[in-house]
Amino acid sequence: MPKILILNGPNLNLLGARQPEIYGRETLDDVAAACASLGTSLGLDTDLRQSNHEGQLVDWIQEARGTAAGIVINPGAYTHTSIAILDALNAFDGPVIEVHVSNVHRREDFRRHSYVSLRADGVIAGFGTEGYTLALRRMASLVPGAKPG
């Protein structure tokens, strides 16, 4: 099965507890379970990871060059600041889908700029944690060997 790396940036380990009025009550473990279940039905092997450290995210993106068919990424605050993550994504040959739990376009002005969007094949924002499963459904139509659903 094609492997999809699902990366999460800073503070997403607090999903479900941090500002639930913005980010909802689902935890990152809930997201991982939903992605694993849907991934199996789509013929995808999912690997969800989270780090508060930019360099760790860059390392994982670089490792994905030889191991993953696609990347789903919610870079958190690094969305708006990290050229390093953009550069790493630019060196990855497979599809990249950017996900945001909240609608970043209805929030502070600085959240409307994304370095990651310059590389992403698509952006999903404002659908809560369902954005991850929407990204997987799209990914299934982009990577060879998956079962589009």
Image: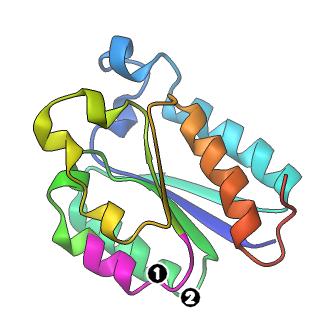
Range shown magenta: 86-95
Percent across and percent down for residue 98 are 44, 55
* Residue beneath disc 1: 63
As drawn, the residue found furthest toward the top would be: 21
Q: Is 129 on the left or on the right of 99, as rendered?
A: right
Residue picked out by circle 2: 66
- Considering the image in quadrants, where does the N terminus appear? bottom right
Query: Toward the viewer: 122 or 53?
Result: 122
Name the residue type under label 2. Gly
Mark 2 to mark 1 CA distance (whole Å):
6 Å
Whether residue 87 is in magenta: the answer is yes
Q: Position of residue 95 (x, y in %)?
A: 56, 73
Q: For the residue carrying disc 2, how many other residues have a C-alpha within 10 Å: few (<14), some (14-19), or many (20+)?
A: few
Q: Which residue: 56% across, 79% down?
A: 94
Helix, strand or loop under label 1: helix
Q: Is residue 15 above or below residue 136?
A: above
Name the amino acid type tagged 1. Answer: Glu
**Up-down relation of residue 28 to residue 2 (above or below):** above
Please name the residue shown 41% across and 71% down the image.
60
Image position, residue 17 (x, y; %) = 37, 18
C-beta proximity under 8 Å, tags 2 and 1: yes
